[in-house]
Each structure stands twice: as C-alpha cells, then as structure tokens.
Amino acid sequence: MAWVMDFAQPPGTLWRPKEPIPIRLPHTVVGSHILIVAQMLLYFALCLQQLPPDFDNTDLDIGNPEETAQSYIQAVTRVVLANDELACSVQGVECLSLLGMIHINEFHIGKAWSIFRRALDLLRLLGFHSSFSTSNQDHSVDLETQRHLWLSAVMGDCYCSMLLGFETASGAKPFADMNLSDSAGENIIYHQLCILSIQLTGSDRTSGEGKLRDTSMLNQELEN
C-alpha cells in the first residue's frame, strides 16, 4: 500500500549499507510544520518495520529499530493525531494513511480499521469524498490530491473490513458517478477492487439464495 503516499522509494526498496538514506536529513526539517515532521517520523517507522531479519542494526545507529519505530508512532499519535484540528488536513490524513499501513504490517487489523474509518470521516469533512463526482467544483486542493487521499482511505477500509467481516464505510458508490472505464492509468484496478470488496462484504449480510446469487455475480465479474 505504499503507493498511496507517492513515495519516491517506497518501503520495501530500502537502502543498503553505505548507500545514502532515502529520507531527508534531520537538520533539513528544523522549522518545518509539525505535520511535516510527523509524516517523516511515520515514514521512517514504516521503513524500520520492513528491515530484513538479518539487517545489521549498527548501520542505523538508533538502537533497537522496533523500539525506535514505536516511539515515533506514539509521539505522532499523542501530539498530532490526537489533535482534530491538525488531523483534519491533507497532511493529517496522510499521517493517518501511514499509521494505518503500519498497523496492517503489524497485523493489528482492528487498529488499522479504526484509523482508516477516521480518515474517511475527516476526508468527508474536507469534502474530498465528492472528488470523483462530475459536479465537484471544489478545487481549493488539487483534484488529483483529493482523489488520491480518498482512494487510499477507501482501499484501507475495504481491506480491513474484508478481513474483519465488517461492511465498508465508504458507501455503495465510493467513487460517485465516475465511469470506471474512463479511469486513467493504473488506478482503475484499485477502483475495481474496492467496488468488488464492497459488494462482497455486502453479500455477507445476505442469506440463502440471495447470497449465492450475489456470490455468483461477483465470481463472474472477477473472471471478466
């Protein structure tokens, strides 16, 4: 899911010893907004999570990577994400997406689910849920950014809801009246997977012949 943050080097393509670290140096964030610092800390924590088991921790010079990552997560959660005014912003929602991915990696699906649900609610307050509507006229934030954040939150909610057996919170049509066949680039597969997972979690609430019919229809869609 690292693609949702548009990382130049997503977690999983981590640096090797003696290579430059693919994040900004600490002194470059002095004076930056607290949300920028929070994003960096969560990004670094996400990277630390995915170090190979045989990685030599001495190369990092930060002590125990797991404990360091947890301290970053706790600090950001306590100082930034507990503040609704900070969280209800583009950078705040990006922090929530990162935190959701971190919890998924730790298989704390319930925590990740609640994080993505909060992200969806905040994005609705920001009006980003209508970014896929042809009638959307709000361009105070770049439309691509609006869609990017909404899609990432929908994906996170769909994934966690599927694992937990819950209905999704993004509604039956999370992408409004957008014609998915006109979706540009690689994102169309993510749109379609979200729609299918929403339909699947909805069919779990159906019983008997209705559930069998819905499952058969979904199976046909997957085959196509």
Image (cartoon, rainbow, N blue to C red):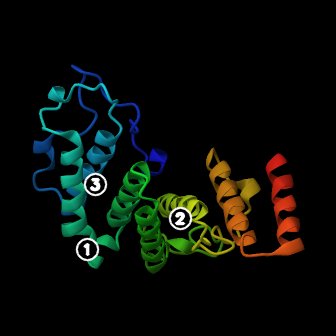
Q: Please name the residue that numbered disc 2 is placed on.
A: 157
Residue 148's spot in the image, x, y percent?
Answer: 50, 58
Q: Element under label 1?
A: loop
Q: Element under label 3?
A: helix
Residue 16: assigned label: none
User: Eyeballing the image, is 17 above or below 136?
Assistant: above
Say what amino acid the circle numbered 1 marks. Ala
Say what amino acid the circle numbered 2 marks. Asp
Residue 27's spot in the image, x, y percent?
Answer: 10, 43
Disc 1/disc 3 C-alpha distance (Å):
15 Å
Is 149 on the left-hand or right-hand side of 47? right
State the residue in front, 172 or 67: 67
State if disc 3 and disc 1 touch (CB < 8 Å).
no
Q: Please name the residue that numbered disc 1 is placed on.
A: 82
Residue 199 placement: quadrant: bottom right
Q: Residues within 10 Å of mark 3 (few under 14, many from 20)?
A: many
Please name which of the two marks, 3 or 2, marks the residue nearer to the observer.
2
Q: Is residue 178 visible?
A: no
Q: Please name the residue that numbered disc 3 is placed on.
A: 39
Q: Residue at x 23, y 26 (%)?
A: 20
Residue 162's spot in the image, x, y percent?
Answer: 61, 61
> Residue farthest to the top?
18
Q: Earlier in the sequence, mark 3 or mark 2?
A: 3
Q: Earlier in the sequence, mark 1 or mark 3?
A: 3
State if disc 2 and disc 3 touch (CB < 8 Å).
no
Is 216 on the left-hand or right-hand side of 36? right
Q: Residue at x 42, y 75 (%)?
A: 122
Residue 102's spot in the image, x, y percent?
Answer: 37, 52
Q: Residue at x 47, y 66 (%)?
A: 113
User: Eyeballing the image, is 200 above or below 55?
Assistant: below
Q: Residues within 10 Å of mark 1 (few under 14, many from 20)?
A: few
